[in-house]
Amino acid sequence: MRIVRLHLLERVVEPLLIRIGVHFGEKSLEKCKECKGKMVEAGEHLYLLPVKLSEKHEESAEYYIRNAKKIQSTDEIPSGTRACRMFIFECQNCGHKIVSVVDFLHVRGSEVLEGGDIYPFDKFKDFF
């Protein structure tokens, strides 16, 4: 049971906390997992997903790379369609990068969080 909780914390809660921190102006993470240096936001991208309302989809870097379509603003999100924000964070000490993907549904001008995950930047380096 403890492993399930830790997995849930790592896959869902941590990316959402990152998103909440970014939303409220905190542009950094606590520490790099490689060297314990300060992680800072190094970019943000918005993508449309081919998923409606609360349909489920595969949560993997490969899924996002294959299916996410770049958009410029939330005005381009059709009603009932999900989108995601991808935040790139970089360590100020060692340069290690990660990508935080936060999946959401745009409802009446608000982002209703549906999920999220953190991936190594290497999986996305040719995507951005």
Image: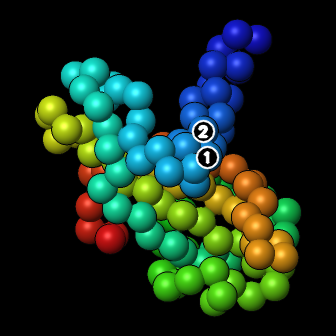
Query: Quick one: label 2, few (<14), some, or many (20+) residues within 10 Å?
Result: some
Q: Quadrant of the C terminus?
A: bottom left
Q: Quadrant of residue 124?
A: bottom left
Mark 1 residue type: Ile
Q: Going by the image, does 92 lie left or right of 2?
A: left
Whole-percent x, y for residue 45 in the image:
44, 70
Q: Residue at x 32, y 44 (%)?
A: 40
Against 72, residue 2 (above or below) is above
The numbered mark at residue 110 is none
Against 89, residue 30 (above or below) is above
The numbered mark at residue 20 is 1
Against 53, residue 92 (above or below) is above
Q: CA distance from mark 1 to mark 2?
A: 5 Å
The numbered mark at residue 17 is 2
Whole-percent x, y for residue 39 in the image:
32, 37
Q: Quadrant of residue 120?
A: top left
Q: Secondary structure at mark 1?
A: helix
- Is residue 11 visible in this depiction of the protein? no
Q: Residue at x 76, y 68 (%)?
A: 110
Q: Quadrant of the N terminus?
A: top right
Do the residues under discs 1 and 2 have CB atoms within 8 angstroms? yes
Q: Residue at x 26, y 61 (%)?
A: 125
